[in-house]
Image (spheres, grey):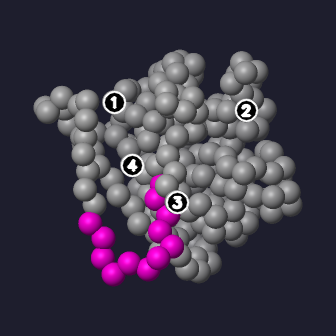
Amino acid sequence: AAEIDLLRIRTPLQAATLHLRVQGVAPTAPTLLSVSVRRKGAVPAPTFTSRDTALAVPSQSQMVLRPELASHVCSPTSVAMLLAYYGHSADIYDVIAEARHQPSGLYGVWPANIHAAACRGLLGYLLHFPSWEAARALLDAGFPVVASVRYEEGELSRAAIERTSGHLLVVRGYAGDTVLVNDPAANDEVARAYDLAEFCKVWLERSAVGYVLFPPL
């Protein structure tokens, strides 16, 4: 089945070749192509370390925005938080407009959100995370992660919203058996801590998708 930016293949493959055709881009324009493949299987349980990491990502709530947008813009709100983390001052409504996927009218199309960050000078890529350790390595290097979570009521203790079929938030660190996040679905207390094992279940055992933004080298 094909989705906006995701191809699911249920038939086992021995090999695969990717052909890319780019239209509407000037030949001299730089283009970044990122391909991530996820094999279905058990996700290893997170391991705990004695080290704590807490990145200073500024908070931004989506729920204080205009009512017609508030429930739809978790992804561009997360982008705005990362832009602020990297020192880019940007009007939240400008970021939302740049992140809107014109063909569908949606604000949560991941490549469109990475494009919105690119308009402000950041690079980025989308990937499937194979384990919590992969995310932890990025956090230890100073790179927050925008994670896509999905959960039912009771699966994520003290969550900003009771349940969601798809929600984006910023993972900014960890401490002991908790993960530190900026959850844009909170009216206040955007910066909060979730149980790490529960979070890995609703993230890595569901979509396992996240995107990373970083300044150009």
Taking 78 as reference, is 62 left or right? right
For residue 164, above or below residue 84 = below
Disc 4 marks which residue?
A: 125
Identify the amino acid type marked 2: Ser
Label 1 and label 4: CA atoms lie apart by: 14 Å
Q: Position of residue 147 (x, y in %)?
A: 57, 52
Disc 2 marks which residue?
A: 71
Identify the amino acid type marked 3: Ala
Identify the amino acid type marked 1: Gly
Q: Which mark is residue 121?
A: 1
Does the segment drawn in magenta span residue 13?
A: yes
Query: Sequence-wise, which precedes: disc 2 or disc 4?
Result: 2
Q: Position of residue 29 (x, y in %)?
A: 19, 32
Mark 2 Cα shell of 10 Å, populated few (<14), some (14-19), many (≥20): some
Q: Residue at x 73, y 38 (%)?
A: 185
For the question of whether residue 150 can be seen, the reply is: yes
Disc 3 marks which residue?
A: 1
